């Protein structure tokens, strides 16, 4: 240790530093040096991921509300990096959702205030979780049960965070990020379809490829786009921002909505997912019919005219046979009956495979009608209920209604239906009590619920982070359901100060 110029200095290896250097400065310098080394040695893709992740983490810690926007951007790309964790594979979106939830809790604790929009949806969600918890008593595999239950708890936490956004600007960020992510995922599907990028089993007509994005399968890819598309459509038909007084933010969101419709609509078709097609059709019809009386009349008239033209001109003979068969052979789901003795062929494989898993779920439910086989336990108990020619469980029953009934019994299935009925009612109330962009969002969420309800007849959309985007949509409209078009919403907050904890009510701007 030496003295120079009246100041004490610490000498280490010939280097002297001011004695006033704090441990925080030293830690920051060491972190920066370590990060520089990592970036210098890591591949370019990892370097971009590290820098982008560091920025996102820093911003989320400062403004957790913006973290929900980053989460929306990650949802369609979360499977690019996954970590095996027991029976589950946890992707970037799931990990980041946990971080956002933690940051939100720290933010509330720091301000000693918890914002929470009151809603009748919370008790319904609690009822659903309670039914899942009770079903665990019947579970063969506790790890599979914890995996599925954790997913739904994360769903509820993200929904709560989104519902607690304090102002409209932050909700617009999440909305814009969701639309941007959907557009990016759609463009990736375009590239795969047109350039023939993908596995051999996805080839269409010898020259195209079924679009699948980063979801590894076309069905969840179409499902993800199907829960973004109705929101985009509803935004562009619900308000016109190109008028005096409209903010630039609303205009950007409107443009993102228009770009979303133009890119995501064709991408759903390119996925060649029958469930995605039916779900998207239901979503679009829901948005158009509920837009207003005139829109409902024109939509129904257009549907009748198109149906009449199709029948009179016998367009079924002109269209490609593969397309007609793809749309019409779904009737086999309801006419084939028991497929235990049906020999699968390339022509009937998709239908018979799904029916085999439906029947396995029905057998589970018939033997465990009240509490099911345990949440998340469809796969572990599948060997005891499977049909002879179908040994692979595929993870779920390819029909979520049968899946939830098999896993949680009658109580769980009823709780699930009640929750989504409550969600639809919340969206309807939000549509009635909101105006402009928020009326469009509420209308879009009604379309999202329609798509989810139809597509889940053929698949399970609570996979690969898609459930996080659904939670964001529901959370965004919860505050709107309790607000009028021109009034501030009433929000519950818990404020902790000193030794006491008080409950009061405050207004926060929509």
Image (spheres, grey):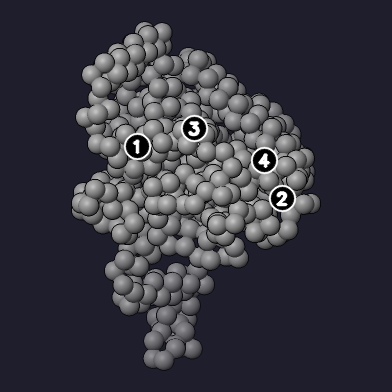
Label 1: which secondary element: helix
Disc 1 and disc 3: Cα gap in Å?
Answer: 19 Å
Q: Residues within 10 Å of mark 3 (few under 14, many from 20)?
A: many
Residue 93's disc is none
Q: Which residue is mark 4?
A: 405
Q: Residue at x 47, y 44 (%)?
A: 351
Q: Residue at x 79, y 51 (%)?
A: 137
Label 3: which secondary element: helix
Q: Residue at x 70, y 60 (%)?
A: 141
Closer to the chain start, of discs 3 and 4, is 4
Label 4: which secondary element: helix
In front of the other: 110 or 47: 47
Closer to the chain start, of discs 1 and 3, is 1
Marks 3,4: beta carbons within 8 A = no
Looking at the rendered image, the disc whose residue lies closer to the viewer, 1 or 3, is 1
In front of the other: 129 or 198: 198
In the rendered view, tell whether residue 54 sits above or below residue 458. below
Disc 2 and disc 1: Cα gap in Å?
Answer: 37 Å
Disc 4 and disc 2: Cα gap in Å?
Answer: 10 Å
Left or right of residue 422: residue 15: left
Disc 3 and disc 2: Cα gap in Å?
Answer: 24 Å
Marks 1,4: beta carbons within 8 A = no
- Tell me where residue 461 appears, x and y as whole percent: 50, 43
Report if residue 391 is visible in the image.
yes
Report if residue 276 is visible in the image.
no
Looking at the rendered image, the disc whose residue lies closer to the viewer, 1 or 4, is 1
Q: Which residue is mark 1?
A: 325
Closer to the chain start, of discs 3 and 2, is 2
Q: Which residue is mark 2?
A: 374
């Amino acid at each position: 240790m030496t003295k120079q110029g009246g100041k004490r200095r610490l000498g280490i290896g010939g280097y002297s530093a001011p004695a006033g250097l704090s441990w925080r400065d030293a830690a920051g310098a060491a972190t920066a040096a370590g990060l520089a080394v990592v970036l210098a040695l890591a591949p370019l893709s990892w370097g971009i991921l590290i820098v982008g992740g560091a920025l996102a983490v820093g911003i989320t810690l400062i403004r957790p509300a913006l973290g929900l926007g980053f989460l929306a951007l990650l949802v369609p790309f979360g499977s690019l990096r996954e970590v095996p964790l027991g029976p589950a594979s946890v992707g970037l979106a799931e990990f980041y959702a946990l971080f956002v939830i933690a940051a939100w809790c720290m933010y509330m604790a720091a301000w000693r205030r918890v914002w929470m929009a009151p809603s009748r949806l919370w008790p319904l969600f609690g009822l659903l979780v309670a039914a899942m918890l009770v079903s665990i008593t019947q579970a063969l595999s506790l790890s599979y049960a914890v995996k599925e239950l954790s997913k739904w708890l994360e769903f509820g936490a993200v929904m709560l965070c989104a519902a607690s956004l304090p102002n409209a600007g932050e909700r617009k960020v999440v909305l814009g990020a969701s639309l941007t992510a959907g557009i990016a995922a759609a463009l990736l599907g375009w590239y795969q379809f047109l350039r023939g990028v993908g596995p051999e089993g996805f080839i269409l007509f010898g020259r195209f490829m079924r679009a699948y994005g980063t979801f590894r399968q076309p069905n969840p890819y179409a499902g993800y786009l199907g829960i973004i598309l109705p929101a985009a459509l509803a935004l562009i038909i619900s308000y016109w921002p190109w008028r005096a007084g409209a903010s630039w933010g609303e205009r950007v969101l409107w443009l993102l909505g228009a770009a979303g419709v133009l890119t995501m609509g064709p991408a759903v078709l390119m996925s060649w997912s029958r469930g995605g097609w039916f779900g998207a059709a239901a979503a679009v019809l829901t948005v158009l019919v509920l837009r207003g009386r005139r829109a409902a009349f024109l939509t129904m008239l257009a549907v009748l005219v198109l149906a009449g033209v199709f029948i009179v001109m016998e367009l079924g003979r002109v269209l490609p046979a593969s397309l007609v068969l793809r749309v019409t052979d779904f009737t086999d789901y309801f006419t084939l009956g028991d497929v235990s003795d049906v020999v699968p062929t390339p022509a009937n494989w998709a239908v018979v495979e799904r029916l085999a898993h439906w029947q396995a779920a029905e057998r589970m439910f018939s033997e465990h009608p009240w509490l099911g086989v345990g949440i998340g336990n469809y796969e572990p108990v599948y060997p005891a209920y499977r049909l002879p020619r179908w040994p692979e469980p595929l993870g779920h029953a390819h029909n979520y209604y049968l899946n939830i009934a098999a896993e949680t019994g009658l109580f769980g299935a009823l709780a699930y239906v009640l929750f989504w009925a409550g969600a639809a009612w919340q969206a309807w109330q939000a549509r009635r009590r909101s105006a402009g962009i928020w009326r469009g969002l509420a209308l879009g969420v009604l379309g999202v619920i329609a798509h989810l309800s139809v597509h889940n007849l053929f698949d399970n959309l609570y996979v690969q982070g898609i459930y996080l985007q659904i939670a964001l949509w529901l959370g965004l409209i919860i505050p709107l359901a309790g607000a009028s078009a021109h009034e501030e919403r009433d929000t519950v907050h818990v404020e902790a100060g000193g030794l006491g904890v008080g409950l009061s009510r405050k207004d926060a701007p929509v």
